[in-house]
Image: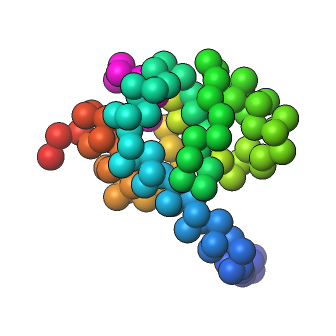
Amino acid sequence: MGFTRITYTEEQKRRDEEHLKDVKYYNNNYHKLLAQYPERWIGIFGQQVVESAASEDELIARLKARGFRWDLVFRSRLTKKEENLIATGWGEEELRDILNVQGILQE
């Protein structure tokens, strides 16, 4: 069985860098965003909230309707309640930042 070489293109690298900027925007503005969008799902693109909704499905539908590639938009639910955080594709440092901001992880 052979190995398949995966090529990481410049476009993918650029998208990942932009997505990380959106994650950092979320982290740095979490409490302000929570006050503005309590108990709502938000979509962040280009370091700004581009849409919000009561559910993730509704958020994705709204993003699609506005012409966004929803899979490139950072999405999260803003809540004061502790929830299980499922985040694929984030490194340990990004997850730690999110947990610290939300007050879930105390170092």
What residue do we see at 27% from left, 33% from top? 104
**Can residue 83 be seen in the rendering of this structure?**
no
In the image, residue 25 sits, relative to residue 99, either above or below, namely below
In the image, residue 33 sits, relative to residue 2, either above or below, namely above
Task: Left or right? Give the position of 57 relative to 75.
Answer: right
Residue 54 placement: quadrant:
top right
Prevailing secondary structure class for the magenta stretch in the rendered image: loop
Residue 93 placement: quadrant:
bottom left
In the image, residue 3 sits, relative to residue 54, either above or below, namely below
Task: Left or right? Give the position of 25 relative to 107.
Answer: right
Q: Position of residue 20 (x, y in %)?
A: 51, 60
- Most foreground residue, 40 or 48: 48
State the count of labels. 0
Task: Left or right? Give the position of 85 relative to 102.
Answer: right
Q: Position of residue 24 (x, y in %)?
A: 43, 54
Q: Position of residue 22 (x, y in %)?
A: 52, 54
What residue do we see at 54% from left, 53% from top? 47
**Can residue 82 be seen in the rendering of this structure?**
yes
Image quarter of the N terminus: bottom right
What residue do we see at 71% from left, 79% from top? 9
Furthest residue in direction left, as rendered: 107
Q: Position of residue 91 (x, y in %)?
A: 43, 59
What residue do we see at 81% from left, 39% from top? 66
Image color mode: rainbow
- Most foreground residue, 62 or 82: 62
- Magenta stretch contains residue 29: no
Residue interval drawn in magenta = 78-85
